[in-house]
Image (cartoon, rainbow, N blue to C red):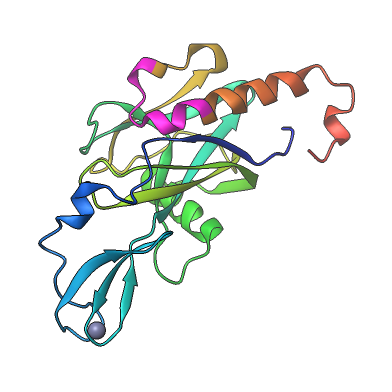
Amino acid sequence: MVEQQFVELSVVGSSPIGHPIYMKQQKLQYCPICGGEASVKKDDKSLFLECKGGHRFYINPNPTVSAIIYSGEKILLTKRAVEPFIGKWDLINGYIELGETPVEAIKREVAEEIKAKFLPESIFAFNTSEYYLNDLQKNMNIYFYGQLDSVKKLNIDKKEILQVKWFDFNKIPYNKVAFKHHIPVIKEFIEAQNRCAGCVYRESCNY
Ligand SMILES: [Zn+2]
């Protein structure tokens, strides 16, 4: 059981507003709505592509979901089979597809990657981060925690991951974790679990 909280743990990277990459973006020159000529503009809050017809296509962070899967005092991590950070350890995570809710998205990601049913208990944290394959995108990451409906042998999607492993809370390989924005969230989750571990109300507690 975990103390329920919404932890905005870290904002990795700087605000994109005014970032020169956007103002020099030569590839974003057509409106995705009407196909007319467009250019990247900004006002005091937002960055957007605008065409002569007045359509605006906002450049906002893309939502992702991540799963902190625990069992007892262990967390499940997967070793990435794809770039970026091939060979590094990761939480199961991915983008929310159009039409999905965040819960549907994280259940789908877990089912795809380790062929298991994830039972999310709650949202634990969220943060924002860089996207590692280009400078244009940013991500907004939602972290769920929960357990698997069964911890029998897991079948992995070998196109996505090389290995799956349960790590003791005190043996998380932080120096080999793929995405640095996951690290403070994992640490905070473990701290929260440890705080609850000795609580006499643990079994009946809703947190
Ligand atoms: Zn347009």
Q: Position of residue 74 (x, y in %)?
A: 56, 22
Direction top: furthest residue: 170
39 or 102, nearer to the observer: 39
What segment carries the magenta color? 175-184
Direction left: furthest residue: 26
Q: Position of residue 133 (x, y in %)?
A: 21, 44
186 or 33, nearer to the observer: 33
Q: Is residue 47 left or right of residue 30?
A: right
Q: Is residue 131 left or right of residue 143?
A: left
Splitting the image into four quadrants, where does ligand 1 fall? bottom left
186 or 134, nearer to the observer: 134
On screen, residue 190 above or below 106:
above
Residue drawn at x 43%, y 59% as measured from the top left: 45
Q: Quadrant of the N terminus?
A: top right
Q: Is residue 202 left or right of residue 176?
A: right
Q: Quadrant of the C terminus?
A: top right
Direction front: furthest residue: 44
State yes or no: residue 173 in magenta: no
Q: Position of residue 142 (x, y in %)?
A: 52, 47
Q: Is residue 155 left or right of residue 81?
A: right
* Magenta residues, dominant SS class: helix
State yes or no: residue 178 in magenta: yes
Residue drawn at x 48%, y 19% as measured from the top left: 167
Residue drawn at x 47%, y 17% as measured from the top left: 172
Residue 126 position by quadrant:
top right
192 or 180, nearer to the observer: 180
Q: How many marks?
A: 0
